[in-house]
Image (cartoon, rainbow, N blue to C red):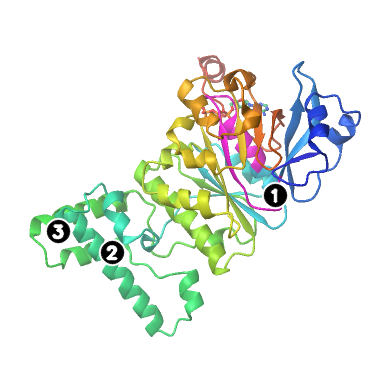
Amino acid sequence: MYVLGRDETEFDREDATDRDAGTSSDDATDRDGDCPPHTARIGSFLARDGSVGAAVGVDLDGPHAGVVFGKRGTGKSYTLGVLAEELAEADGVAPVVVDPMGVFGGLEAAGGRVVDPAVRPASIPPSTWPDLLGLDSASGPGSLVWRVVADAVDDGDREAVGAGDSASTAADEPSSPSLATLREAVAAADAPAETRRAAANHLRLAASWGVFDADAPSVASLIADGDPVVLDLAGVPDAAAAAVVRAVARGLYDARIDGGLPRLPWLLVDEAHAFFDGVAEPALRTLLTRGRAPGVSLVCATQRPAALPSVAVSQSDLLVSHRLTAARDVDRLAEAEATYLAGDLAARLPEGVGEALVVDDATETAHTVAIRERRTPHEGESPGASRLSQSEPR
Ligand SMILES: Nc1ncnc2c1ncn2[C@@H]1O[C@H](COP(=O)(O)OP(=O)(O)OP(=O)(O)O)[C@@H](O)[C@H]1O
């Protein structure tokens, strides 16, 4: 098997080129052979004549940053699901899937759990709250919310220390005010009535999102057993979904820094473009630029590569691109600035669903890969009129 993302693959680059072209004599053995430990088998090399070559895996021994690109319906979510299945079976890792479209429920067949996301208000920094609520932080209501959250979090920390909580317990499960507590603090604040009313209204709106819970379990405790956790964000308002992604991304990073997570977490984010222009952005950026040091992997899938910051591509050591056609999206791919990608990139992107150009920074190679079929159900079928007319009673 050819292992992407691992500096010392079993084969040298020349060998990989042979395999890419489907000419290696032991292709069949490799295709059907066992998967080496700490490797995710994602598919097989695909030759230009359409023949399938050696198996291709992704290194799971160390952390990675990756992107999965492709036009609608080319197989991005499916590919993310294949990776999640492999992570479900691997030792020492823990996948968390951000599922904005509700298409990863099939991972339950791989031992996964679909959870309604819950976030402690304290896991969103006080300075971020005005933005989260759509308030200008320089405005009266915005600065009031900022101040009230900061005071409530400080009070909570003091109480935890006063109650004799050990530092580590406080770090694992920091106490958090509830939204009701925050609203009470707003009502009692020394501020004009109009300011208090506006701040309270925005907090009430946030409560209606249904994702804030002062007693929500930490993400580290959710993934303690290593089984996949699917955060079902279907139907959750954009701002609330962004808050969830922020809290989870930061929670994984902090848990690894604090030593509170014995596994290497993999955060797989579908429809990732939706999270790079809101409150989740700083946490995702942290994972992209600094996540690998403590062992946190991030894989972002999107149909709109141009909507991701350049850093998403420049920091990724693994790039999987299904078909793209828009020039601005292909340009973002080209920002990988890899000399081995020189030439007409758009022309190198495979046409077929489930086929991808895979760029591996570790070995500085690019290959066409046919992503393998899912073992668990994929729920991302686009609704088609023909399929609907078959299932609807007439
Ligand atoms: N590797 C594959 N093997 C077999 N079928 C696949 C593969 N990848 C994708 N498909 C098929 O293509 C369909 C679309 O794939 P998927 O839902 O992943 O698209 P997508 O790129 O995420 O689309 P969208 O942008 O609309 O979310 C799947 O439902 C599945 O039927």
> Would you say residue 382 sits in the magenta stretch?
no
Query: Which stretch appears magenta?
Result: 59-83
The numbered mark, 1 or 2, whose residue comes first in the sequence reads: 1
**Image check: 192 left or right of 227?**
left
Task: Classify 363 as above or below 332.
Answer: below
Q: Is residue 63 left or right of residue 7?
A: left
Determine whether the beta carbon of the residue marked 1 sits less than 8 angstroms from the nearest atom of ligand 1.
no
Residue drawn at x 72%, y 51% is 90
4 above or below 262? above
Answer with the quadrant where ligand 1 appears in the image. Answer: top right
The yes-or-no answer for disc 3 within 8 Å of ligand 1 is no
| Residue 144 placement: quadrant | bottom left
Residue depicted at 34% across the width and 74% down the height: 156
Disc 3 target residue: 196
Q: Which of 373 and 332 is in front in this view?
A: 332
- Identify which amino acid the numbered label 2 is placed on: Val
* Amino acid at circle 1: Leu
Q: Residue 60 carries which label?
A: 1
